[in-house]
Image (spheres, rainbow, N blue to C red):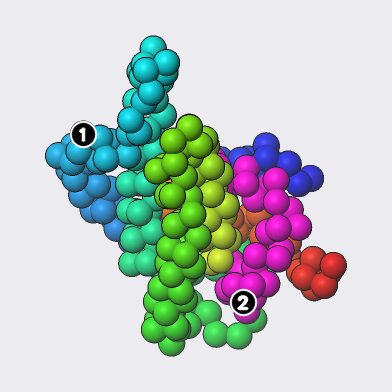
Amino acid sequence: MSNPITGAGYFLRGLKLITQPGLRRFVAIPLAINLLLFGGLIWFGASQFEGLLNSFMPELPGWLQWAEWLFWLLFGVSVLLILFFAFSLLANIVAAPFNGLLAEAVEVHLTGEQLEGDAGWKKMMAELLPTFIDELRKLLYLLACTIPFLILFLIPVINIIAPFAWFAFMAWMLALEYADYPMSNHGLRADEQKLCLRKKRLMSLGFGGSVTLATMTPVLNFLVMPAAVAGATAMWVEQFQGQTGELIED
């Protein structure tokens, strides 16, 4: 069923999958990358958070001064969202080749069938450069889509909805980001991936929203990347595999 709860359930399932004995070794490198980058984020956020918050916080009219604490909360969360999202993207760019291996291993674990064609480390090395190019393309797409949302933060009154719009945008982008790994293993291009996810938009947003919340949760955020890759792979196997032609053509 295409609903947010189903999507969120796949992320929780991903957390369970990465503890399986046959998959742990594929989790080690993405986990190490996440530890290093999020450790850097914590240090950077602790030193720069107040300045960033002041730059995003709008000037409130007198009749809204009573709600200043609420706006500080909303815009504090917004700054954290932006910081965590930026570092998540950086982590994904660095770990992209290893995430493809993890997605492949999870699919084999779930289906018991090997992927067609080259697989494993040989495939990873052969596709190393194209993988990084694809990640940079996704980053450019993100930047192009981010500008309108960031403008919302600068428009008085309208900027009240900016944190909520940004959260929904992050949920969609992270669904695209992590679904890319199992889908790319089967040759789906970026535009085909978007079409598939749009046909099950609520489920995709539920998955991406749960990943977004986990990214902001201390300790859990270190496990987000491998768990999201595993969860997206389970979602691919059960919700999309065998239906992609129908979903793309509809």
Residue at 74% x, 53% y: name it: 200
Is residue 71 covered in magenta? no
Q: Is residue 176 left or right of residue 243?
A: left
Q: Is residue 113 above or below residue 39?
A: below
How far across and how far down the image is residue 239, in percent? 74, 56
Q: Which residue is mark 2?
A: 189
Q: Is residue 198 left or right of residue 33?
A: right
Residue at 79% x, 45% y: name it: 1
SS under mark 2: loop
Residue at 39% x, 12% y: name it: 66
Q: Work out how far the residue at label 1 is from the one at label 2, CA to CA, in angstroms.
A: 41 Å
The amino acid at mark 1 is Glu
Q: Which residue is mark 1?
A: 50
Is residue 195 covered in magenta? yes
Q: Is residue 128 above or below residue 245?
A: below
Question: Observer-nearest residue: 50 or 179?
Answer: 50
How far across and how far down the image is residue 45, in percent? 22, 41
